């Protein structure tokens, strides 16, 4: 696609150059700074001074002053001119002779050694290998031989350095460092004149058209190839750029990065080196010279000289952007990197990227736009400002000038298309969500978060709550009205909470739960409020809203207190802790909540306080008695309530037993509870009497014995089971239970727990008329236990004898050698010194106090350990 990259500006008009002499034609040109040198066909060199100045329209024009002209006296055309500014010399090719003239006076150098004869063409090495700044290296094509000669040109002389043979007669040459790029009769080639290495490039017929060999950079050349192609080649013979497709009749080429300018018979064409596309075409008749001099492209016809003035790069880019040619603009910007100072380029590049991003944003190409915004480090507020009312009223942001885009706002961009508006808003949500945690939001976090909150609320986005529940910089004054407008009261409460206004948050949420405000964000808002209060560090707010929560649901409301730390149990109280006594007093009018809170303290937190355990037990008891007094009685509820009471009575030892016993003494339905309470008072006979004779629950009686002897020594357990056996066999007590039934219970008890009983005592208690067959399991177990105890004692006795024998042996060994004891030597067991000569030697001859050795023998004796591990069956 086309772009205006150059303007053709006249430099030297025909009248100034030749006056009324019609036969004078321009043969060559050279430009050095402001100085322009023109060689003509009548053997003259003309010297002009070009002064640049800008017109009122911002265009560039030239004022030309003719300083001097000089006739060389050879009556031949001046074929080539090259300036050597370091030497203040002009190298001239005329009549197959290279000579040197003064740059100012155009007078020939007086010495005769400054000429080279038999020259067909020459070029200057722009990348010389000679380090001497006061000489110029040139490559010369010999007109008579197939050679290229390398010369050093000094102020007053020339010196041959190298002569290189070529396979064919060269037609054109360009020189860079040691590398010669040659156009031969039939092909192009690269030749290293230092090493002699040659690389053929591609064939070319010099008879059909003029070859072009142009150095465009370090070790890189531009060549006119067959098929109307401009080929690039480096010193290795490799093309690292795609060719440009120019005219078949190109007669000259120049490079003004990033463009390749070509001249043919009627036009000047401009191609981009970046994408190889034709960018501009200028009509130009009778042109035959096109050269570039230090970034200045000079064009000449046979009668006049023109300058192709490149338009400012930024202007070209802006024109491309104005045509929405984003990729071309970016490619041009990137390609111009090397020609622009780094700091200036970074500023220009960022701005171009931002403009490109807005163009693609307007085309709904959001992925590309986002990438350009990020790379160009766009101030995100530029994008937010397109969306009406999203920026906070307190924001000090003003849009960039000159503007980065052509849109007034989102409505202007969308032109009433609501689908387009919604797509743009969804893009902004995504973009702000990504950029808010990066450096792109530094300095404007409040604007970004506030805008994001407004978009979330307006779009009913699921991330609204995540934003408010995490660290954010949303402005309360700007966000609150917006959330109210869109009925996001729960979110507004979160915002109040984040800003330390818990009271306002709770007040708002309570109104939603009560139905005064409508917000369907959370169906479990009541549960959320309870949870919020349970972690609230302001006790005044807790007490203020606890009653409201308990009135709605005591089971849920009590969690305000059950989820909080218990203050008086902590060494160092915290703000969010409450005193259990205060809570219990407060919950006095909420019986269900009070019961749940007491369960939390006693059963959940395991707080060991008599007051709390008694209070919970009384609550359980009152609950059971209340249910029992109802008519009709709900058996399931009674069963659950009694299970809780019985568990507490069994597991806890901190409640006031007599108080509870007095409350249930008159209730004939709570025998099991009464038995448990008697057990707590160590009144086991009463407890067992209730279980056996009143409740008639023999399994419960056995379970009572197991429970009552838990964590007690075997003797206590044996006493409790013997007591139960005596209750079964006591014939003196009146009982409604048949004697046969009690006897069977006694037999079952003995057979199931025979290892607990003392067999001798049991045999004394049993009636004489009992059959041994009934007691066979018990007697068998008792016999085995007795035999085991006897054998264990025998083993222990044997071990003791062995130990005693070993000690006697050690004692005899120690008597054979003296044992040294002094007041300075300490006992290894107690670390005290010896005050008396009496001592005991440990194995190895280590002396210890006699009392220390005795304690160790008692503690570590294997006999003692064996006896401790054996069962007592005697």
Image: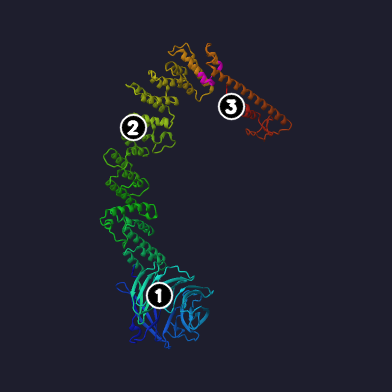
Q: Which residues are magenta?
A: 749-760
Q: x, y (%) of residue 68?
A: 39, 84
Q: Which residue is mark 1?
A: 253
Q: Residues within 10 Å of mark 3 (few under 14, many from 20)?
A: few
Q: Residues within 10 Å of mark 1 (few under 14, many from 20)?
A: many
Tell me the element at label 2.
helix
Q: Residues within 10 Å of mark 2 (few under 14, many from 20)?
A: many
Q: Nearer the viewer, residue 356 or 211?
A: 211
Marked residue nearer the N-terminal end (3 or 2): 2
Tell me the element at label 3.
helix
Badge 1 vs badge 3, beta-carbon distance below 8 Å? no
Q: Vertically, is 3 above or below 475?
A: below
- In reply to whether residue 727 is colored magenta, the answer given is no
Mark 1 or 2: the one toward you: 1
Spatial separation of the CA atoms under disc 3 and disc 2:
54 Å
Please name the predominant secondary structure of the magenta segment in the image. helix
Q: Vertically, is 818 above or below 333?
A: above
Spatial separation of the CA atoms under disc 1 and disc 3:
110 Å
Q: x, y (%) of residue 478?
A: 30, 49
Mark 1 or 3: the one toward you: 1
In which quadrant of the rendered image does the N terminus lie? bottom left
- Residue that protrudes farthest toward the right in the picture: 816
Spatial separation of the CA atoms under disc 1 and disc 2:
94 Å
Marked residue nearer the N-terminal end (1 or 3): 1
Q: Which residue is mark 2?
A: 554
Q: Which residue is mark 3?
A: 869
- Residue that protrudes farthest toward the left in the picture: 416
Does residue 62 appear anywhere in the picture? no
Q: Vertically, is 640 above or below 5?
A: above
């Amino acid at each position: 696609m086309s772009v205006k990259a150059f303007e053709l500006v006249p430099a030297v008009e025909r009248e100034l150059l030749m006056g009324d002499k019609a036969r004078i034609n321009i043969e060559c040109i050279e430009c050095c700074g402001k100085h322009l040198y023109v060689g003509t066909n009548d053997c003259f060199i003309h010297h002009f001074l070009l002064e640049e100045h800008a017109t009122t329209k911002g265009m560039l024009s030239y004022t030309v002053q003719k300083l001097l002209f000089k006739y060389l006296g050879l009556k031949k055309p001046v074929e080539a001119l090259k300036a050597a500014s370091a030497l203040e010399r002009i190298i001239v090719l005329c009549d197959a002779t290279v000579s040197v003239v003064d740059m100012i006076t155009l007078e020939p150098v007086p010495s005769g050694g400054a000429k080279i004869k038999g020259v067909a063409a020459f070029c200057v090495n722009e990348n010389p290998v000679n380090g001497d700044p006061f000489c110029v290296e040139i490559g010369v094509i010999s007109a008579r031989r197939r050679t290229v000669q390398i010369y050093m040109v000094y102020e007053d002389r020339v010196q041959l350095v190298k002569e290189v043979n070529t396979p064919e007669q060269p037609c054109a040459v360009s020189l860079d460092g040691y590398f010669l790029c040659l156009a031969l009769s039939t092909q192009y080639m690269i030749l290293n004149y230092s090493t002699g290495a040659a690389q053929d490039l591609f064939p070319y017929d010099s008879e059909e058209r003029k070859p072009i060999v142009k150095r465009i950079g370090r070790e890189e050349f531009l060549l006119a190839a067959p098929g109307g192609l401009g080929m690039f080649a480096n010193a290795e013979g490799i093309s690292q750029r795609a060719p440009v497709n120019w005219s078949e009749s190109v007669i000259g080429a120049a490079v003004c990065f990033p463009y390749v300018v070509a001249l043919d018979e009627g036009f000047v064409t401009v191609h981009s080196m970046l994408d190889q596309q034709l960018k501009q075409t200028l009509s130009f008749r009778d042109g035959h010279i096109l050269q570039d001099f230090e970034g200045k492209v000079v064009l000449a016809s046979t009668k006049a000289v023109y300058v192709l003035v490149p338009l400012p790069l930024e202007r070209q880019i802006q024109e491309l952007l104005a045509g929405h040619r984003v990729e071309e603009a970016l490619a041009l910007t990137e390609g111009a990197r090397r020609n622009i100072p780094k700091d200036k380029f970074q500023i220009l590049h960022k701005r171009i990227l931002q403009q490109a991003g807005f163009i693609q944003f307007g085309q709904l190409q959001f992925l590309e736009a986002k990438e350009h915004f990020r790379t160009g480090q766009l101030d995100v507020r530029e994008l937010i400002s397109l969306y009406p009312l999203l920026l906070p009223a307190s924001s000090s942001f003003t849009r960039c000038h000159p503007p980065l885009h052509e849109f007034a706002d989102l409505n202007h961009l969308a032109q009433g298309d609501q689908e387009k508006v919604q797509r743009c808003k969804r893009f902004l949500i995504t973009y702000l969500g990504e950029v808010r945690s990066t450096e792109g939001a530094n300095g404007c976090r409040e604007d970004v978060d506030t805008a994001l909150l407004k978009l979330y609320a307006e779009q009913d986005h699921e991330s609204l709550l995540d934003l408010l529940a995490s660290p954010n910089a949303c402005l309360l004054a700007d966000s609150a009205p917006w959330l109210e407008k869109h009925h996001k009261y729960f979110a507004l409460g979160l915002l109040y909470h984040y800003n330390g206004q818990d009271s306002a948050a709770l007040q708002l949420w309570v109104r939603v739960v009560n139905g005064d405000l409508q917000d369907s964000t959370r169906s479990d808002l009541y549960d959320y409020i309870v949870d919020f209060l349970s972690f609230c560090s302001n006790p005044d707010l807790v007490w203020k809203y606890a009653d409201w929560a308990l009135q709605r649901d005591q089971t849920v409301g009590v969690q305000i207190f059950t989820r909080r730390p218990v203050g008086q149990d902590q060494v160092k109280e915290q703000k969010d802790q409450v005193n259990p006594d205060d809570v219990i007093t407060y919950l006095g009018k909420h019986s269900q909540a009070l019961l749940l809170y007491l369960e939390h303290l006693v059963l959940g937190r395991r707080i060991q306080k008599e007051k709390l355990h008694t209070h919970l037990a009384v609550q359980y008891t009152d609950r059971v008695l209340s249910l029992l007094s109802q008519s009709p009685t709900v058996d399931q509820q009674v069963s659950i309530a009694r299970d809780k009471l019985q568990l507490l009575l069994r597991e806890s030892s901190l409640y006031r037993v007599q108080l509870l016993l007095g409350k249930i003494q008159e209730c004939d339905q709570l025998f099991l509870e009464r038995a448990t309470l008697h057990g707590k008072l160590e009144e086991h006979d009463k407890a067992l009497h209730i279980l056996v004779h009143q409740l008639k629950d023999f399994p419960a009686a056995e379970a009572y014995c197991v429970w009552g002897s838990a964590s007690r020594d075997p003797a206590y357990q044996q006493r409790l089971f013997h007591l139960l056996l005596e209750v079964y066999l006591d014939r003196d007590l009146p009982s409604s239970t048949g004697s046969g039934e009690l006897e069977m219970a006694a037999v079952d008890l003995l057979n199931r727990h025979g290892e607990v009983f003392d067999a001798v005592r049991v045999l004394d208690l049993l009636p004489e008329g009992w059959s041994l067959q009934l007691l066979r399991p018990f007697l068998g177990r008792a016999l085995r236990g007795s035999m085991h105890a006897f054998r264990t004692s025998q083993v222990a006795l044997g071990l003791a004898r062995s130990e005693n024998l070993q000690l006697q042996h050690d004692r005899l060994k120690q008597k054979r050698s003296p044992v040294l004891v002094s007041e300075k030597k300490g006992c290894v067991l107690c670390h005290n010194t010896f005050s008396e000569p009496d001592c005991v030697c440990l194995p190895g001859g280590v002396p210890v106090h006699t009392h220390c050795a005795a304690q160790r023998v008692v503690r570590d004796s294997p006999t003692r350990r064996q006896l401790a591990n054996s069962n007592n069956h005697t």
